[in-house]
Image (cartoon, rainbow, N blue to C red):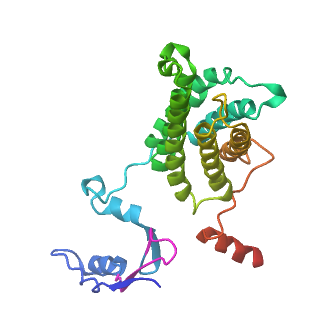
Amino acid sequence: MAAESSISPAPTVEKEGMPDHEQLDLEAQTTRVRHIETHHEDPDLIKIGDNWVSRKELFAAFGGTLNPGYSYPPSRKLANPAPLGLSAFGVTTFVLCMATVNVRGVTSSSVVVGLAFFYGGFIQLCAGMFEMVVENTFGATALSSYGGFWLAFGAIETDAFGIVSAYGDDVKGLNTMLAMFLFAWFIFTFGLVLCTLRSTVAFFLLFFTADITFLLLAIGHLYPDAEGNPHLATTRAGGYFGLIAAFTALYNAYGGLATHENSLIVIKGVPMPWNPQFSWKKKSSVQ
């Protein structure tokens, strides 16, 4: 239901010293607003009389940036940093998870350290910072945080930082703290999953599979084998979920890059079933 409120008719316009015919013209141009209503599906739209306007336009008209707490920040003409951040996450995750699933018998993930520092870490962190500039709080939080994750991972894997060597022969202590490290990222990512429930299927799938990856890797370190190595089956399962997350990240990145101007294959996002856009698409397809 639309919320309505009444406004008194506009007063008669009278200007002292103004000719009568000019006063009549000014009266004719004055809009007499009888009611205001809000859109039942998009609260950002407000109907004034017979015209729909956005709250942003109203805030700009009534006070603009001088109306603290209600004004919108000015838009900035910048490129979308999300595909860069998603690509950095996807590529780095892909390389790490290939080692996690022991592709072609590989067991060492040392090659991913370079990616973790420079692409998954630094570049993704920069993309997150630019998400702040383009006013995307979710993108800034997600990309910057995962950029920090990869930098931390690279530090753990680098002997010069002395993180692993600090535990000496305490393999159990090392595995326990690595499990807690991964559990912390599982909890953080779960919060992001909840924030994607009204987005697209591909975007939700990215964070959901990444969350399962963190959980399985944490369990693998929490219950190592007799030699102190992470539990093989659990860790490998986490690696496969990580590969799904990597490909989903790259899919979303492509969706943000491909346009009708530069590609013959353009991806259209499929909204989640409970997203209002889903019902609009179903209605349009029936019609």
Above or below 279: residue 146: above
In the foreground, 235 or 252: 235
In the foreground, 102 or 196: 102
The answer to whether residue 127 is visible is no
Residue at image location 27% in from the left, 86% down from the top: 8
Residue 233 x, y percent position in the rendering:
74, 41
Residue 142 x, y percent position in the rendering:
51, 44
Point out the residue furthest to the front here: 226
Magenta-span inclusion, residue 2: no
User: What is the chief secondary structure element of the magenta stretch?
Assistant: loop
Q: Quadrant of residue 281?
A: bottom right
Q: Quadrant of residue 104?
A: top right
Residue 199 x, y percent position in the rendering:
59, 59
In the foreground, 140 or 219: 219
Residue at image location 52% in from the left, 27% down from the top: 151
Residue at image location 16% in from the left, 74% down from the top: 17
The answer to whether residue 265 is visible is yes
In the foreground, 110 or 228: 228
Magenta-span inclusion, residue 44: yes
Query: As drawn, is 54 to the left or to the right of 22?
Result: right
Write down the region rendered in magenta: 32-46
